[in-house]
Each structure stands twice: as C-alpha cells, then as structure tokens.
Amino acid sequence: MEGIIKKNVVIIGDGYVGKTSILNSIKQQKFEEQIPNLYDDFEYTQTIGDKQFKVKFIDTAGTKSDLRRTNRNCINKDEIVKFQKKINALFYAECSAKTLSGIDDLKKRILKFFSKERITVVGDGGAGKTCMLIVYKDRKFDERYIPTVFDVYSMTVPINQKNHTVILQDTAGQEEFDKLRQLAYKETDVFVLCYSVDDANSWDNVKEKWAPELKRCCPRAKLILAGTKSDLVSKRVVSEKDGTRLAKQIKADGFIENSAKLGKNIDETICLAITVYMNSITKRDSSSSCALI
C-alpha cells in the first residue's frame, strides 16, 4: 500500500446555514443544539482500495434538508441542480445535521471523489488541450482560443463494458502559471502531454520542458503523449513518425494523434490514458502477490 494521502475539505457558506453542525454530526454521529462558534477541525483516516486517505475537515454542502417538510420557502432541488451545473460543481449533496440524513453519504462521496483516477492534461499554451477536453465533455468544438488557468471535470468513461469515473484536469501552459500549474500535479495518476502538429516549438518543449517537469514532480505517474490538431494537414510540421520517436525518447506509456475539430481520436485519447493506468495497477498487484509453500 502507498503512503497516506492527506486531503483537506473546507466547508464554506453564510453564517447560520449549518456548516458547524454538519462537521459535528460527521465527527460525533449525533446532533447537538448548541455548538461553540469556534469548532475544532478534525481528521479521520480511511482506506479505499490500495489507497489510505487522511481527510481533514475544516470549518470556516445545501444544509438543513430536514426543513423541506415544514418550510415552504426551501430551495427547489431542481434549481439547485441547475446551479450546480452552472458553477461546474463536481457533485451536489443534501444533508441534515439534526436527523443525520445524508451525512454518511456526504463523507462517502467526498472520499469517492478523492479516490477517482485523475488525468491531468498539460502542454504549451495554444496546443489544443482545452479544446480536446471540451469536445470530449460537451461533444462540440469551439474555434476560439480559450486560455485556461485551471479547470476540473468529473466524467464517467465506459471501458471494456465497465464504467470508470475519472477526474479530468485542464492546466495552463503559459510560463507565468508554472508554479500554480504544478499544484494540480499532486495525486495525478496519468498525464496527457500535448503538442500541436503544426507547432514545432510545442513539440520541442515536450522534451526540453514538459517531460522533465512531470518526471520531477510525479515520477510514478503514467504518461501519454498526444499530438493535437491532426486535421491541419497542410500546416503540419511534425510527422506522426516524429511523435512516435519522441514518445520513445521520453519513455511515454502511449502515443496518439487526435483532432478536436473533427472529433477524431478524442475518446480514444482518454480511454488510452485510463487503460494504461488500469494495466499498471493490475501489474503492480500481481507482482506484489505472495506464495506460501
């Protein structure tokens, strides 16, 4: 088993919405009418699969769901779900500290989020990272350049007749975001390192900048090399053979070309990343098995 993975969960919201009561109910498994305004943070440890998590809850997610039955002014669930999608929240959960309804489910969903496979997409600014993820997520292509600082998506991916829920992280490639971007690397299982086939500099930077950075920050993470914008045939300056050769040089675990504009190999890129990661777990588990004679 790997070392303990530490995570922080910060609960925020207006005063008197029930934040401290939620924390107390998670910790004590009971409701108290009066709780001090300053509530101590607390930690608990739980193992999921081959990962052990130490989660720290910090007091500063709709609460008081028990009031739905008696208060006609409660917010409609459909409206909350719409708002969740609007702000790109990863999930929505209701709970009641008073009745303990939904408290255990909230804990489980938080831990489930932490334990999901995490795929982080990196590469030069303008290399097509965000377009690739948008086409994968929304099934539509946007011609505009969409600069990104950091974005996160939770998606369910069917592979070999099984659904895998993964976290997709988009990052900024610009130099001014170097330190901020590396914060997203933590706990990444697979990196998809992108270059554009019409940009020789983005291809050069794979070897000069990106591969060394990823190996330094996350030496155990898997790596997929992806050549983007393969539809730009007349503007191509990096051949597919060049990409294959580069993948071997940086010891990538897989190589693929794709086109967000044509929707070509977009699904295959994400599936390749997940498959490589799942295969690595299978090999690791089989290699660590013991025999008693």
Image (spheres, rainbow, N blue to C red):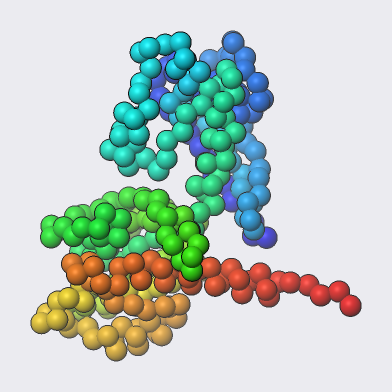
Nearer the observer, 262 or 191? 262
Nearer the observer, 263 or 276? 263
Q: Residue furthest left?
A: 234
Q: Residue at x 31, y 39 (%)?
A: 85
Image location of residue 86, percent across then percent down: 28, 38
- 51 to 231, vertically: above or below: above
- 190 to 115, vertically: above or below: below
Q: Quadrant of residue 119?
A: bottom left
Query: Is 153 left or right of 101, judged from the image as shown?
Result: left
Q: Residue at x 40, y 85 (%)?
A: 249
Instruction: Quarter of the image for the N terminus: give it.
Output: bottom right
Q: Residue furthest front?
A: 161
Q: Residue furthest right?
A: 293
Image location of residue 239, percent across then percent down: 23, 86
Asked if residue 185 can be seen in this view, the reply is: no
Nearer the observer, 75 or 250? 75
Instruction: Quarter of the image for the C terminus: give it.
Output: bottom right
Q: Residue at x 38, y 12 (%)?
A: 72
Image location of residue 123, percent across then percent down: 30, 66
Image location of residue 106, percent across then percent down: 53, 35
Asked if residue 128 can be seen in this view, the reply is: yes
Q: Quadrant of residue 82?
A: top left
